[in-house]
Image: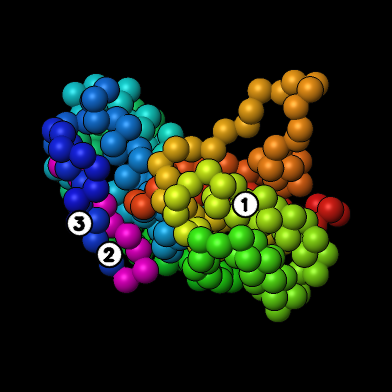
Amino acid sequence: MTVGHPSPLHVTKGTLGPVVVLNVDGVLDSTTYSTLRDSIIKAALDTPTAVVVDVTALVIPAPSACAVFSSARWQVTRWPDVPVLLACAEDDRRDVLIGSGIGRYVPIHPDVDAAADAVGVHARARVRRRARVDLLRDPHSVAEAKEFVTECLLEWARPQLVSRARAIVRELVRNALTHTDSAPSLRVECSGPWVTVAVDDGSPRLATLAEWTLTRRVTGLEIVAGLSRAWGNSPSSTGKTVWAMIEPEWL
């Protein structure tokens, strides 16, 4: 599957076990920077064990363009917190990556297998619980989503987070039903003390906080921002994902 639009840069998506591998060829410059960054972010939103970007065939005329990898990694650091690694079998191109300093933020390996092996150590040390439900484009889906997140958190022994999670899910699903023409889906994830809820919809228009005024009502996103430790949204392969992370109050 080719990700992105026709350009001097081509990104092909594959898998190696639970690892997503993006094979990139072409030229990385100001016109293709965002295509590569968004391709990495979209791959991470499916929450694989890791995303390995094979840049062996990628031409990088300016080392400063390597910042695309740290930018993508920063975008997914809070959630879904999927490791991003680089693989490059071409010595000259690997030297460009190393010389750019990008290795301080994104590990660089000589090939995809070596990168996948490095991921294995990280994955074995981490336990995540995940659940997903596809919702109908119907007002009753708000109640269904609230019940779903409640069942997940009770099963995962996180009862102290239920009330906040229900309030956040209510606003995210309402927003998807109100502002898009798609049927949303809900994901719930638990990693350590952290719980993340994410709603996928079919609209590429990213969610933003409205400018504050004294005369308007509080928006749903402002409620989400106030109840969560962090929130954000990113483009996905089918539209966008809006997510919020919550934690026990004692952290």
- Mark 2 = which residue? 15
Of residues 202 and 136, the one nearer the viewer is 136
Q: What residue type is labelled 2?
A: Thr
Residue 10 belongs to the span the image colors magenta: no
Q: Where is residue 247 in the image (x, y as percent from the top left)?
A: 74, 55
Q: In the rendered view, would you say 222 is above or below 120?
A: above
Question: Local crowd at mark 2 within 10 Å, few (<14), some, or many (≥20)?
Answer: few
User: Total number of numbered labels?
Assistant: 3
Earlier in the chain: of badge 1 and badge 3, it is 3
Residue at 68% across / 66% down in the picture? Answer: 143
Q: Where is residue 243 in the image (x, y as percent from the top left)?
A: 58, 50
Q: Which of marks 2 and 1 is in front?
A: 1
Of residues 183 and 67, the one nearer the viewer is 183
Residue 24 belongs to the span the image colors magenta: yes
Q: Give the range drawn in magenta.
A: 17-25
Q: Which amino acid does label 1 sit on?
A: Arg
> CB under 8 Å between callouts 1 and 3?
no
Q: What element carries label 1?
A: helix
Residue at 21% across / 39% down in the picture? Answer: 5
Q: Is mark 3 on a helix, strand or loop?
A: loop
- Mark 1 = which residue? 174
Earlier in the chain: of badge 2 and badge 1, it is 2
